[in-house]
Amino acid sequence: EALPADQVGCIRNFNLQNGDNIREQLLGLSDYDLFVTYSILESPMGVENYIATLSLSPITDGNATFAEWQAEFDCEPDREAALIQQVGGGVFQGAFDALKSRFGR
């Protein structure tokens, strides 16, 4: 039986635009502390033990929000730099850019 999308332990299964499949598991979620932590169970990236956290902090001067998204994972040493760029510069920055274009100023 599938768990609700906001219940710790639920599995999210989705396809990227290129058709690649990713399965993630929700490890932590707090509306009060403004964070979400998840692990990647399956992906085409070639990473293991991938755990990421997205956290938000209010910035009272200017009514803004600071967003921090970090990930730790294991990979082959020769792929480390490319994966850091793919995850940080591609996935994370792409999501931040989309949020900024929708909600930013």
Image (cartoon, helix red, strand yellow):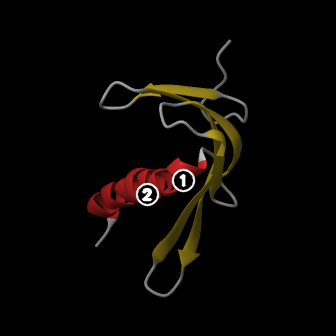
> Mark 1 Cα within 10 Å, few/some/many (few <14, many 20+)?
some
Determine which of the numbered discs, if any, sits on residue 104 in the image. Answer: none
Amino acid type, residue under disc 1 in the picture: Glu
Task: Indicate the position of residue 68 as horizontal and vertical percent values.
Answer: 55, 65
Residue 19's place in the image compared with 74, above or below, is above
Residue 69's image quarter?
Answer: bottom right
- Residue at the far front in the pictured view: 78
Which quadrant: the C terminus?
bottom left
Category of crowding for the residue at label 2, using alpha-carbon neighbours closer than 10 angstroms: few (below 14), some (14–19), many (at least 20): few
Front residue (pair 34, 17): 17
Q: Which residue is mark 2?
A: 85
Q: Residue at x 59, y 51 (%)?
A: 77
Nearer-the-camera pick, 21 or 44: 44
Q: Residue at x 45, y 76 (%)?
A: 64
Q: Position of residue 53 (x, y in %)?
A: 63, 54
29 relative position to 43: left or right: right
How many discs mark residues in the rendered view? 2
User: Which residue in the rendered view is the most extreme toward the top?
Assistant: 1
Which residue occupies 72% across, 31% down? 9
From this view, report whether residue 85 is shown above or below residue 20.
below
Image coordinates of residue 4 in percent, x first then y, are 63, 27
* Mark in front: 2 vs 1: 1
In the rendering, at what x and y percent does residue 1 appear? 68, 11
In the visual, does 60 lie left or right of 53?
left
Residue labelled with disc 1: 80
- The answer to which quarter of the image holds residue 70 is bottom right
Q: Secondary structure at mark 1?
A: helix
Instruction: Name the residue rendered at 43%, 84% in the picture.
Output: 62
Amino acid carrying label 2: it is Gln
